[in-house]
Image (cartoon, helix red, strand yellow):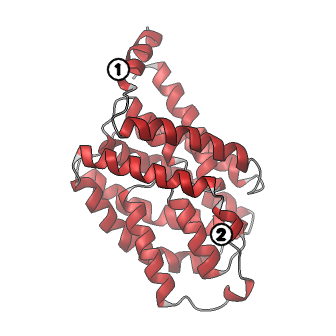
Amino acid sequence: MSAVEIVVLISSGLLVGFINTLAGGGSIISLSILIMLGLPATIANGTNRIAVGLQNVVAVSSFKQQKVLSWKKGLQLAVPTIIGSLLGAEIAVDINEKDFQIAIGIIMLLMLVFILFKPQKYIYGKAEVQDKPINWKVYTIFFFIGVYGGFIQMGVGYFLLAGILLGAGFDLVKANAIKVLIVLVYTPFTLLVFFLNNQINWKYGLILAIGNMAGAWIASRMAVKKGVNFVKWVIVIVILITAGQMFGLYDFKPIIAPLIQKAAH
């Protein structure tokens, strides 16, 4: 692995960890970088889970120190999410490479609509719901969120935030804390599925995780709403670029690979 690849992975990881902790959708960037560096889409999907898991260890620890983490509700919601994530991961490891690339492209375009229409405007916490027991409808919603998260990590944070805000009634800061706890709890299970199917590149994943962890720490220390517009447009640009590659409109790999090799020498 060249020095350029290491710098690219850590730098992108920093941004990814920040975005994932602040809101969600950062895995769009990390998946794009891993694919552009030459990993097949399925292996990039598995490798990304290493960085996501370690990123959320840092984020959960930081939110805990700041006393904004509701462990009870978070762990309750994590149970159906874990079950769903195992199903989603099994689907992901068995899917055809070309089909998976098309699936990533479609999901990215859906995320583009989701981001541009600013769904956070329509999501409000309900303080009166926080102390109520979680009902079966909410558990069912989190099961399907888990299926999505197990299949592809990208953008799951938005769905978790919506579910926590609407289903559990927490404000945005506490919802973010619960979100990273849920992802932290289910990630080892999905990581195991990808590991057993030989779809992880540990070297790339651990180096990417260095940046993810740093980004998570920075984001967890900042106000949740700072920098939202900047983050939004970064994600929009990355979606447009990468979705085009997933649909086969162009391919950056033959261009990027020689540049990396040249810089390494």
Q: Position of residue 131 (x, y in %)?
A: 67, 89
Where is 77 relative to 253, above or below?
Answer: below
| Image position, residue 59 (x, y; %) | 62, 56
**Between 32 and 192, which is closer to the camera in this rendering?**
32
Which of the pair 235/50 is nearer the observer? 235
The one nearer the camera, 217 or 121, is: 121
Q: Could you say which quadrant of the image residue 126 lies in? A: bottom right
- Side of 180 relative to 39 (left or right): right
Q: Is residue 29 visible?
A: no
- Name the amino acid, label 2: Ala
Give x and y (percent) for residue 245: 39, 35
Residue 238 in the image: state x and y as whole percent: 53, 38
Q: Which residue is mark 2?
A: 175
Q: Going by the image, does 121 lie left or right of 21?
A: right
Badge 1 crowding class, 10 Å Cα cut-off, few under 14, some 14 to 19, many 20 or more, is few
Give me the C-alpha separation between circle 2 and circle 1: 42 Å
Residue at 71% x, 74% y is 124
Q: Residue at x 40, y 26 (%)?
A: 252
Give the quadrant of the C terminus. Answer: top left
Q: Is residue 252 above or below residue 258?
A: below
Q: Using the image, determine if residue 143 lies above or below residue 56.
A: below
User: SS at mark 1?
Assistant: helix
Amino acid at circle 1: Pro
Residue linked to disc 1: 254
Q: Is residue 44 left or right of residue 93?
A: right
Specify whether residue 139 is in view: yes
